[in-house]
Amino acid sequence: MYREEVIIFRIFCGVAGRYCRAALHQGGMEVNRKKIAEDFISPRTDIVFKELMRDDTVRRHFLSDVLDIPLDQIKSVRLENTFLSRRSRQEKQGILDVRMQLNGESRINVELQIRRLVCWDKRSLYYLAKMYTEGLGNGQHYDNLKKCIVIDVLDFPGDENPGYHKVYHLRDAEGRLYSKEFEVHIIELGKALTGDKVDDWIRLLRVESREELEHMHSRNAGVVRAIDEVRTMNLGRRLRMWHEMRLKEQRDRWAIEEALKEDAYAEGHTKGCEAGRAEGLAKGLAEGRAEGYKAGCRQGILELLEEYGDIPDDIRARISAETDLEVLRKWHKAAARAESASEFREQMQRQLT
């Protein structure tokens, strides 16, 4: 069914495009090329970059190239909640761009930074430390802590040293490795390419127009997939919203199913297949599936609203507090239709009355 919908969608886009071109020609109007270029959504845009990382093929190849890990060694790359936990309301809330778990062993935070922030390096280390410690609950052993990796993609100079990709570890004064638990990657988009396999990702993130995108070629399957995704996201707003909602629903379902399979395998491997625990595991999987759908809806709503700028605190808090899946689904559709945060707030209130 999904394949048929995509075919229909592509036919519709082609017919619509031909109709618009014919109408412009008949009316004696010329297409304003500058306006088209201005409407192009760059891969460096926050919402586009996040959407690219939601694609399993894109993020697997991206991590394989950046972390220098063979593709066949990447068994799973699960997306995680981007909100870092905090112990009190007074503690600063950390919100990551893209957060993943690699092979169930390492946590990864990918940050795209377009404008230089004051103390951006300390901010990155703060997120790294929070991500490392929040996985340890009361009474748990330190063995439960997972390796944490930060990938900072900067659109401004990080330092004066040559090379656009730098990797940092914890080492002593003589350069001996102290621990592999922390790893920081700095990728600077403005520096000269070096012939490394990350080059094509840099070229993609530098694209500024549709023309540049169409001339972008790569042998990297992940980069090719990312180019197609960027091309799709640069359709008309309404068509793009329809397409993104359909893809997001499909991807969320795949991600949740993959996570449930991994959790079930880990649970069965650790505790065995005793009949007495089967019922508890089934209940846990059902609850996890429901919570996963809710988390996916909340994230999707917030990403759509981010197109209009900063999300008001009352709207963000209301979305985070909502536990009814049907309500969240309605809000997700409302966010795609709304033209502003205030319009979305009105639709929220009407649906709850």
Image (spheres, grey):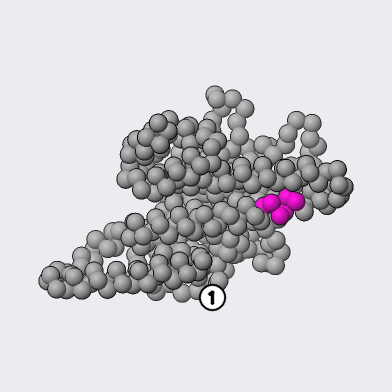
Res. 196 in view: no
Tell me which residue sits at (75%, 51%) in the image: 264
Q: What main secondary structure does the magenta stretch of the protein show?
A: helix
| Secondary structure category for the residue under label 1 | loop
Res. 260 in view: yes
Place of residue 224 in the rendered image (x, y in percent of width and height, measured from the top left): 50, 70
Image side of residue 219 versus residue 48, left or right: right
Circle 1 residue: 219
Image side of residue 329 versus residue 265, left or right: left
Instruction: Decide: is 197 above or below 294.
Output: below
Question: Which part of the image, by quadrant, shows the C terminus?
Answer: top left
User: Which quadrant holds residue 88?
Assistant: top right
**Amino acid type of the residue tagged 1 in the rendering:** Arg
The answer to if 263 sits in the magenta stretch is yes
Range of residues picked out in magenta: 259-264
Place of residue 238 in the rendered image (x, y in percent of width and height, measured from the top left): 34, 56
Image side of residue 329 versus residue 263, left or right: left
For the residue pair 322 and 314, the one nearer the viewer reads as: 322
Tell me which residue sits at (71%, 64%) in the image: 73
- Name the outermost residue toward the left: 28
Tell me which residue sits at (18%, 70%) in the image: 23
Instruction: Decide: is 301 above or below 221.
Output: above
